Image (cartoon, rainbow, N blue to C red):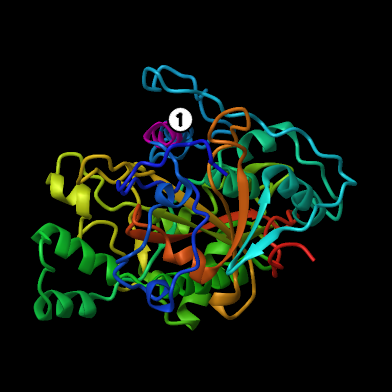
Amino acid sequence: MHKRRRILAFATVGTVICTTGFMPSVGQAAGGDGEGKRSYAETHGLTADDIRNINELNESALPPGQPGNPPAEFPPSAGSPSRAPGSVDDRKTPPAEPLDRMPDAYGTHGGRATTVVNNYIRKWQQVYSDRNGKKQQMTEEQREKLSYGCVGVTWVNSGPYPTNKLAFAFFDESKYKNDLKRTNPRPGETQAEFEGRIAKNSFDEGKGLKRARDVASIMNKALENAHDEGTYVDNLKTELTNNNDALLHEDSRSNFYSALRNTPSFKERDGGDYDPSKMKAVIYSKHFWSGQDQRGPSDRRKFGDPEAFRPDRGTGLVDMSKDRSIPRSPANPGESWVNFDYGWFGAQTEADADKTIWTHGDHYHAPNSGLGPMHVYESKFRNWSAGYADFDRGAYMITFIPKSWNTAPAKVKQGWP
């Protein structure tokens, strides 16, 4: 894919704006220590310039999703003054595809199916685009969103830019404390590196996903026959009481109770039109780095912050207000890491998490540059959750989309029959 690109020899250059992933071992998928886990750049031969451009383009898309900033239909131009001198804005919007053109078969390998972005547009139009029973051609606006890579796949399916406010995860506090007491740093491993590794291994993405799915199920029950927000909240509290769920005791101003109200499509005539019964709760995921505190110890930015982005022990909620999508800092010369990765889940009903499919992409669409065209992936959960050395946190987000949108089908068939 990048045959002409020089590989950064022996440097663990990391990037994963949208992971393609390799099929991990069972141990890695279950939350192993990541030893031997490669970075995206090592796997695909990306250069430091590629990584810088990817991160800068990601940052240009972030302002609408930052805490305190209202969602917007489009980010500011990637060529804005915020981009570093010498960076290249070579992202292109994929061309339109005829509505009646069927997609070609995906290429499959291990736990992943792969296709080019143009072919994904054809599949999206045939499978995911329905609005009130009618297939829709992906608009230029939607194709513009899609061109941003992994976040683009989630963005085009969720409607508003992902704001990441309602996030869930699972952290095994007992495992963390026991591992700190009963094990020692590896030879040459600093204390900060040791603590970061133990914290990373104490997160269980399978249980984090289960928590998000359980909460989304409660929310969807509360949406049924609720034609105003007050009724929805009353229904929600009833369902939480019936399930003896700790979220019942969240403050009324909590992101949990305000999530529906703050979803832009809930306020639109073509969306929910302030009618909760027209909405559904769906899920996506974000992988990111914990050491984002620029005022904290530099070792935590290199090896992870054990205290950062831990979920509440009772509710599973993760406070994402300090997430600024800042990438991991290099610990050695030649290292460089990408800032985040998104995967779209929707409303799949497959009970076995390992059989669920996560749709994501490799990088922004730059067909006329050395980076090349964007590819879209459908990965099984073990592949998705294993991640890369670029990330030490995985959170599972709940957002709302209109029920009339078919961008969250109950079942996703990997690849294309």
Q: Is residue 207 visible?
A: yes
Name the dominant secondary structure of the magenta segment: helix
> Quick one: quadrant of the N terminus?
top right
Under mark 1, the amino acid is Ser
Q: Is residue 344 above or below residue 368?
A: below
The percent position of residue 26, horizontal first and vertical second, equals 43, 78
Q: Nearer the viewer, residue 74 or 304?
A: 304
Q: Nearer the viewer, residue 91 or 319?
A: 91
Q: Which residue is mark 1?
A: 60
For label 1, count other residues whose C-alpha is less than 10 Å away and answer few (under 14), some (14-19) or many (20+): many
Element at badge 1? Answer: helix
* Left or right relative to 379: residue 85: left
Q: Is residue 237 visible?
A: no
Q: Which residues are magenta?
A: 48-55
The residue lying at 56 percent from left, 59 percent from top is 230
Q: Nearer the viewer, residue 101 or 239?
A: 101
Quarter occupied by residue 319: bottom left
The residue lying at 77 percent from left, 53 percent from top is 123
The percent position of residue 133, horizontal first and vertical second, equals 85, 55
The residue lying at 69 percent from left, 59 percent from top is 107
* Left or right relative to 385: residue 356: right
> Quick one: quadrant of the C terminus?
bottom right
The percent position of residue 300, horizontal first and vertical second, equals 17, 51
Quarter occupied by residue 338: top left
Is residue 64 a member of the stretch shown in magenta? no
